[in-house]
Structure formats: C-alpha cells, structure tokens
Image (cartoon, helix red, strand yellow):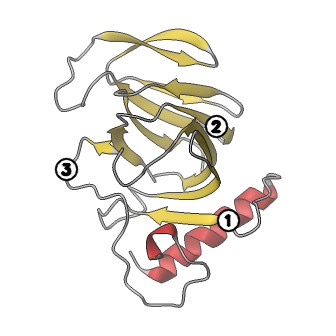
Amino acid sequence: MKRSEINHLIEAATKCFEAHGWALPPKPKWDVTDFGLGDWRTSGLVLVNLAEEPEYCEKLMYAQKGMATPSHCHRQKKEDIISRWGTLRIHLWPTDPRFAEAGKPFTVQVNGEPRQVITGSHIDLTPGERITLTQGIYHEFAPVTDECIIGEVSTANDDQTDNYFSNPQVGRYPGIQEDALPIVLLISDK
C-alpha cells in the first residue's frame, strides 16, 4: 500500500469524522490496512484506537463503499460492531465460511436481542444499531452507503494473534511503499 494512499484515507476519515461530530482523542493511534491484499478499494479499513485497556478497548473505524473487511473471527475477543453513521452490511457464518454448512440457522444478538440468521446471510446496521459478535463467529463487513463510520467496543484486543481470517492470503497490516512522508505514524510503523 502506498503511503500517499494511507495519507489520503486518513484525511478522508478525518473529514468524515469531523463532519458527523466525532471528535478524536489527543494523539489518536491510527491503523490503515489493505489486509495485505494490495487493493484497499476492495479490501481495506481505517481504524483509530480510542481506548486500549487490559479489560476492554474501543475503536472508531471508517470505510468507503467497496472497502470490505474480509471474513474473520476472534478466539478471545467479544465485540459489538456499531454503525455510527451510514449503513453497514455484515455477512455472518457460525464457522469458517470455507467449511460452513449453507442454509444452517444460528443466533446472534442485534441491538441486545437474539436474532436468528442463516449461514452466509447478512444484516444491515443503520446508524445507532449494533451487533454483538462472540468468539468464533465469522464476520465480513462493508458499507452500503458511500461512507460509513463504524464503532467497536470489545474485550481486550490483540490484532497480532486474535484475528483468524478465512482467506489465508490476508495479512493484518499492509506492506507500505514509501512514496510520500507520513502525515501520522500508524500502529504498524512502530
């Protein structure tokens, strides 16, 4: 991923956050990824860590239409994914999509209420709506609207060891081609 593209995405996210009243903390910790797949327009996400504590964390994320976060699950982390602005589509599987039984129903919590979904189906979250994802539930998400602000509140987070992607080609952090000076350092730059 080119540093100029990372800078562009940070600027776009900052403008979107400001336009919709989301103030960032002093010295926010930025993370921008193409998931190692080389095309952030189809597999990409901008993240800002708002709180990192031993028991919990909070993130604010940004994506443009077409940018998907590839299917993955967590073995330790339990999380709520929240649409903060825009509409977010989340595809769900009770196990790795490569091996999931098509048409099988399972239950997730949406807005604090149990909801039965079908393996591989999706749920659209409008602003303020949230889904609770427990360990082992595979999920993939992308905006339906042109832009989306996404919140995450979760138990302690370890992006190095607790992300299990169904595509073995996915890497959590991008390789960076330094074609411009960084406007901020990313978590992966340190």
Residue 175 in the image: above or below residue 16: below
189 displayed left or right of 104: right
Q: Nearer the viewer, residue 1 or 146?
A: 1
Residue shown at the point (35%, 34%) measured from the top left = 75
Residue 110 in the image: above or below residue 76: above
Q: CA distance from mark 2 to mark 1?
A: 20 Å
135 displayed left or right of 126: left
Amino acid type at image mark 2? Ser
Residue shown at the point (65%, 72%) measured from the top left = 11
Quadrant the N terminus occupies: bottom left
Residue shown at the point (19%, 50%) measured from the top left = 168
Which residue lies under the disc numbered 3? 168
Q: Secondary structure at mark 2?
A: strand
Give the label, 1 or 3, closer to the camera: 1
Q: Secondary structure at mark 1?
A: loop
- N-terminal of the pair, mark 1 or mark 3, is 1
Amino acid type at image mark 3? Pro
Q: Residues within 10 Å of mark 1 (few under 14, many from 20)?
A: some
Q: How many marks?
A: 3
Q: Residues within 10 Å of mark 2 (few under 14, many from 20)?
A: many
Residue 116 quadrant: top left
**Which circle marks residue 83 in the picture?**
2
- N-terminal of the pair, mark 3 or mark 2, is 2
Q: Residue furthest front?
A: 54
- N-terminal of the pair, mark 2 or mark 1, is 1
Q: CA distance from mark 1 to mark 3?
A: 30 Å
Q: Residues within 10 Å of mark 3 (few under 14, many from 20)?
A: few
Q: Secondary structure at mark 3?
A: loop
Give coordinates of residue 101: x percent, y percent. 20, 17
Amino acid type at image mark 1? Pro
**Which circle marks residue 130 in the picture?**
none
Which residue lies under the disc numbered 1? 28
